[in-house]
Amino acid sequence: MTEASGEVWFYHMERSTLDQVLPELLDRTLQRGWRARVRVADDDQRREIDERLWTWREDSFLAHGSAEEPHAERQPILLTADDANLNRSQALFIVDGSDMSLTEEFERCFIIFDGRDDTALTTARARWKALKDQGANLAFWKQSDEGRWEKAA
């Protein structure tokens, strides 16, 4: 795990699912004028995310592509399992405990984890501690009872 030079934001899901949270965060990232990369190690989950981004709203979709497809460098959102930043993204999303290597080139790294999953929770705690020990610029976001995101640390 390498130290991030930008910000590392942890998103602790307790009431929502990844299908609900990830598209909203990606949309905000694009509105900011940034490109995004979503690192997902599991092929099946990557395909599910791919489908969800095309159908996330009845009146809208999030344009994206896969690193294995032609013209990956043109994609505003790139789904990938590896470290190559083909689309020169400013934001990295890690959603399934994927490798934390090579995060220093991003303005912001999002670590999204399900707080109802003991393994995901343990992994997130270990990452938080390791990054804190490295002096990383960290933020921790937790869902309120109303489902809104609140900064907890």
Image (cartoon, rainbow, N blue to C red):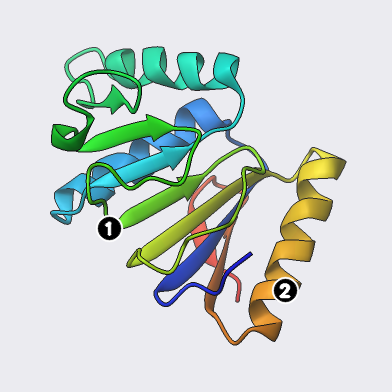
Q: Quadrant of residue 72?
A: top left
74 sits to left or right of 96: left
First reached walking from the N terminus: tag 2 or tag 1 = 1
Q: Residue at x 58, y 30 (%)?
A: 17
Q: Is residue 57 left or right of residue 82?
A: left
Q: Residue at x 65, y 45 (%)?
A: 113
Quadrant (top left/top right/bottom left/bottom right) for the C terminus: bottom right
Q: Nearer the viewer, residue 151 or 137?
A: 137
User: Which quarter of the rendering shows the N terminus?
Assistant: bottom right
Residue position marked by numbered label 2 in the rendering: 130
Q: Nearer the viewer, residue 61 or 15?
A: 61
Hey, what amino acid is under mark 1? Gln
In the picture, the disc for residue 111 is: none
Task: Give residue 46's position: percent from left, percent from top.
Answer: 50, 22
CA gap, disc 2 and disc 1: 22 Å
Q: Position of residue 87 (x, y in %)?
A: 22, 43
Residue 20, given in percent of the width and then of the height, sits at: 47, 30
Q: Is the C-beta separation of discs 2 and 1 under 8 Å?
A: no
Q: Amino acid at mark 2?
A: Ala
For the point 48% across and 60% down, which residue is it?
A: 102
Above or below for 36 versus 91: above
Q: For mark 1, give the secondary structure.
A: loop
SS of the residue at dot 2? helix
Residue ID for mark 1? 90
